[in-house]
Amino acid sequence: MKKFLSLLLSVVFALTGFAAAFALCNYALNYSQSKYEKEPPSELTDIGSPNKVYFNELSNVEKHVYNAILSEIYDFPDSITIPQVTEVQLRNVNSALLYDNPEIFFYGGEGHLISKLNRISYFPEYIISKSEYAIQKKKLDKVCEKVLSSLTNPEDEWQTELEIHDYIIDNCRYELVEGNHVYSSVYGALVNGKAACEGYSKAAKLLLNMAGIECSVVCGNAVDEDGESQKHMWNAVKINGDCYYLDCTWDDPVSADGSDTKLYDFFNINEEMISLSHSDISGGFECTATAENYYIKTGKYFETYDRSDEKRLAKLLADELNGGSDSVRVLFGSLDVYNQAVDDLFSNKRIYNVLTMASRETDKKFSLNSVYRSEDCGRPMLSLVTEQK
């Protein structure tokens, strides 16, 4: 009986000791979490992107995890010690890392956690090896250097944005391959010349950031050509003090005959303009200005329209013809103004007056009887396309 009591007491003491140890570890873990939640870390400025919008949307503990991963990820470590987080918090961190830092295209934002007492080890998974990344990064740097060195006036933010926009569109073709990360990366867009919308937007962010212009990727939905809402990514860019939306992917459509077309319809547009086709926009950006919109900036915008504007429309068409194009695309202040202009130009046949005036200001020969209009359903935009002789 004494032996039994002695054994029972030993078990009780052992369980009590284990419970105390567990409670102590749990206290240490909760204390550690509380500490991270109360102490917000500073944004890292010497590594990764120069502006990290999505970092600033994280909770304090998520920010600590973000900084811990970003500080080490370029060295391809097997594991990284991070604060205690849930799987949901870790997904938030990885999304922010990849949206903010397009140059970490070697990292797919996946991995697993191993917890030992109050120590958490994160084991990241890499898309390519460290040696492969070194080779690909060298190729990417060469392209970026080429683009930046070709800028005609780096001090002019609008002109710099325009030239980067044009470079991406001229040198990248839209292609989506499900499950293949390269098509969602800056490497796919700038080196391979093939990318989905994520690759386009990350390429724009990388190049504009390198040129000293604030730019972030934006996630949301967009209505495709079949009228269906699809996941999409584009950019928010700060030009001359104001924020605008920029969508290089939608400015790079493939025409019905398979040829490439370069547009400026989504070059520095505001909330009102983009809401006609894009929704559920991330980032909390406030894009309300219009001054740096492509059509307004280049004089291809008609707030109102009457016959006194025919001369200006003719001059715009002539300038495009002299520049080697066969058409001019203009933006109107509203659908009502657009409908008024189209009715007068085509129903009242005033288009022939415009074409006649344009022919006097260009040596390019085109048929005055073959012009046709190309319209964008739902947006007040009009293209006048001529047939060259």
Image: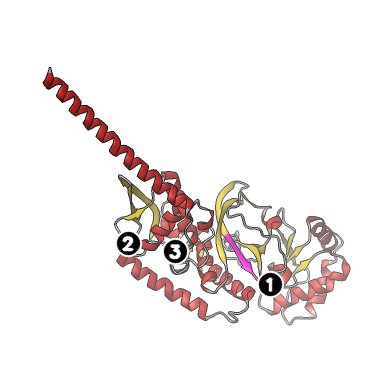
Residue in the foreground of this view, choosing between 284 and 363: 284
Q: Disc 1 residue type? A: Asp
Instruction: Give neighbour class at mark 1: few <14, some 14-19, many 20+ (Cα, 10 Å).
Output: some
> Number of marks in the image?
3
Q: SS of the residue at dot 2?
A: loop
Picture quarter containing residue 290? Answer: bottom right
Q: Is residue 185 visible?
A: yes
Which residue is the site of mark 1?
A: 326
Residue 329 in the image: above or below residue 176: below
Q: Nearer the viewer, mark 2 or mark 3?
A: 2
> Camera-side residue: 284 or 26?
26
Badge 3: few (under 14), some or many (20 or more) residues near its Cα, within 10 Å?
many
Task: Identify the image quadrant of the N terminus.
Answer: top left
Q: Is residue 385 something one can see in this rendering? A: no
Q: Secondary structure at mark 1?
A: loop
Cα distance in 3D space between marks 2 and 3: 21 Å
- Given residues 363 and 172, the one toward you in this image is 172
Instruction: Check disc 2 and report the residue beneath it.
Output: 76
Which callout, 2 or 3, points at the residue further toward the start of the chain?
A: 2
Sequence-earlier tag: 3 or 1: 3
> Distance between the Cα atoms at labels 2 and 1?
52 Å
Where residue 92 appears, as percent x and y from the top left, is 47, 50
In the rendered image, which quarter contains the C terminus?
bottom right
Magenta span: 235-240
Is disc 3 placed on a helix, strand or loop? helix
Left of 71 or right of it: where is 168? right
Residue located beneath label 3 in the image = 188
